[in-house]
Image (cartoon, rainbow, N blue to C red):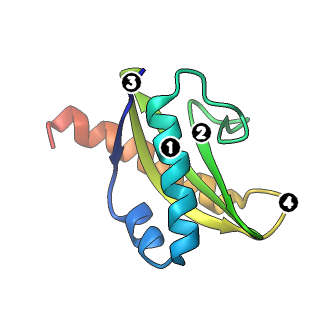
């Protein structure tokens, strides 16, 4: 299986650029796994409860835990939104709200042909 990964806006890329090289390597590993493995383990990709089709990519480099929000469009296309470094047990509601807004904006832009 092969999935295409697209980055919507600059949210993820701006976050990624600020990370240490070790963290980038781990994030790249997880993204490559998601792109190429048919059934991705929950350890790396998990649906966010209480949302409509929003997922979190899960990466960890040492003690640094990262969450990257994404969703699927047309089955084999993964759209990556925003990301953050997890510092508490619960995912911050404002990060989920931002991902949901970006997802809605993506579909609006897509319908306009942008």
Disc 1 from disc 4: Cα separation: 20 Å
**Decide: marks 1, 2 in contact (CB < 8 A)?**
yes
Disc 3 from disc 2: Cα separation: 14 Å
Quarter containing the C terminus: top left
Counting residues from the start of the chain, the first of labels 2 and 4 encountered is 2
Disc 3 from disc 1: Cα separation: 13 Å
Residue at 54% over, 78% down: 20
Q: Looking at the picture, tell me which residue is in the foreground, 110 or 83.
A: 83
Q: Which residue is mark 2?
A: 55
Q: Secondary structure at mark 3?
A: loop
Q: Which residue is mark 1?
A: 70
Q: Secondary structure at mark 1?
A: strand
Q: Which residue is mark 4?
A: 89
Counting residues from the start of the chain, the first of labels 3 and 4 encountered is 3
Counting residues from the start of the chain, the first of labels 3 and 1 encountered is 1
Badge 2, how many Cα within 10 Å: few under 14, some, many 20+? many
Q: Secondary structure at mark 2?
A: strand
Disc 2 from disc 4: Cα separation: 17 Å
Counting residues from the start of the chain, the first of labels 3 and 2 encountered is 2
Note whether 91 is above or below 49 in the view shown.
below
- The mark found on residue 41 in the picture is none
Q: Which residue is mark 3?
A: 76
Residue at 59% over, 31% down: 52
Question: x, y (%) of residue 53?
Answer: 56, 30
């Amino acid at each position: 299986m092969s999935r295409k990964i697209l980055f919507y806006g600059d949210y993820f890329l701006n976050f990624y650029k600020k990370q240490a090289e070790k963290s980038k390597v781990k994030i790249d590993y997880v993204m490559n796994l998601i792109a190429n493995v048919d059934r991705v383990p929950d350890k790396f990709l998990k649906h966010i409860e209480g949302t409509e089709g929003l997922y979190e990519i899960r990466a960890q480099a040492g003690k640094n835990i990262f969450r990257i929000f994404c969703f699927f469009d047309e089955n084999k296309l993964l759209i990556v939104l925003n990301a953050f470094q997890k510092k508490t047990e619960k995912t911050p509601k404002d990060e989920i709200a931002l991902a949901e807004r970006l997802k809605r904006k993506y579909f609006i832009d897509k319908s306009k042909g942008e």
